[in-house]
Image: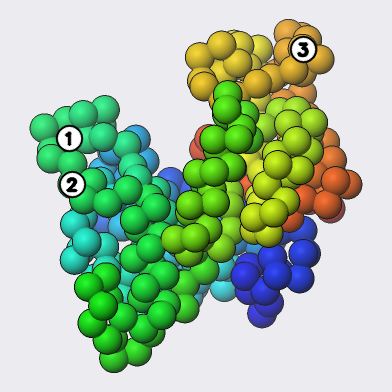
Amino acid sequence: MTTLKEKNRQHIFTITTELDPPKSASPAVTEAQVVKVAPYVDAVNIADCPMAKLRMSPIALSSIIQSRYHVESIFHLTCRDRNVIGLQAELLGAYALGVHNILTLTGDPPSIGDHPNAKGVFEVDSTGLIEIARTLNEGHDFMGHDLGEPTDFYIGTTANPGADDLDREIRRLEGKKKAGAQFIQTQPIYDIRQAEDFLAAAKDLELPILFGIVPLKSFKMAAYLNNNVPGIYIPPHVMKAMETGGRETGLQISRELVTALKEIHADGAHLMPVNDVDAVEYIAKDN
């Protein structure tokens, strides 16, 4: 099987999608979702207690998905819940389980989640976590002590193509690349020109970029994202289409964006279906 890392190196257009783990000791719900999306994606992202809400371990779930369904996983790891010892222990365990793709995140504060009195750790941020993963790849721990055997993680980070200060965003990514980042998955885009501008600005990074896509379900959703979420810009023609359209219109817009990303030679698309896993087939099939 050609890995996500190899596909990115060969500039093969890749599609990934994001799934939330269950709040359960059973992985059955997510397994059923994986069965639906597996034929259409190159890898599945598994979130790490998203929005600071308790969920199953993304590492354990990623291992189950890979072993049972033979689809690559990208596990998210946040700095919220673990100090540098815990982060390294998680990474070593993940590698031993065969889970080698990671998306590094700082994480949401516990105060917004379902355990608001829990203490956040945040001993390092996402750049520090990237550096930790890189050092393990180099065969030593964060303090410089040799490991019995090194890891070989494919280290991912995030970016915002709609950042108000794009130059600052690129400088931030330069720092993450220096720390060890090897690929990028972005926040959602709805305007292909935004993707083109970001590709041009980030070309010297020479990192694979998978652009985020969140399918719109309604005009209300589009208006909320456009007006309230920093970094998201929904162009007027999309807003107009969603005025009279619903889920089907949003899916078609997402499908057209994936096609357009291929045409501008982006490295891939990262689908975030917001629990509408049936959307993945429509967007990605034959695309």
Q: Secondary structure at mark 3?
A: helix
Q: Which residue has dot 2 on it?
A: 121
For the residues marked 3 and 1, what is the alpha-carbon distance in whole angstroms?
39 Å
Camera-nearest residue between 65 and 85: 85
The residue at 61%/11% (across/down) is 223
Dot 2 falls on a residue whose secondary structure is loop
Residue at x 27%, y 70% (from the top left corner): 142
Look at the picture and state if 152 lies above or below 47.
Answer: below
> Which residue is found at the position 56% from the left and 67% from the top?
72
Q: Residues within 10 Å of mark 3 (few under 14, many from 20)?
A: few
Q: Amino acid at mark 2?
A: Val
Q: Quadrant of residue 120?
A: top left
Seen in the picture, residue 280 relative to 39 is either above or below; the reply is above
Residue 92 x/y as whole percent: 31, 75
The earlier-in-sequence mark between 1 and 2 is 1
Q: Are marks 3 and 1 in contact (CB under 8 Å)?
A: no
Residue 54's disc is none
Q: Position of residue 96 (x, y in %)?
A: 36, 81
Q: Residue at x 70, y 42 (%)?
A: 201
In the image, 228 versus 286, the foreground residue is 228
| Residue named by callout 3 | 236
- Residue 50 located left or right of residue 263: left
Instruction: Measuring from the top left, give residue 210's x and y in whole percent.
Output: 66, 50
Number of numbered discs: 3
Query: Which residue position holds label 1?
Result: 115
Q: Amino acid at mark 1?
A: His
**Cα–Cα gap, marks 3 and 2:** 41 Å
Label 1 Cα neighbours within 10 Å, binned few <14 / some 14-19 / many ≥20: few
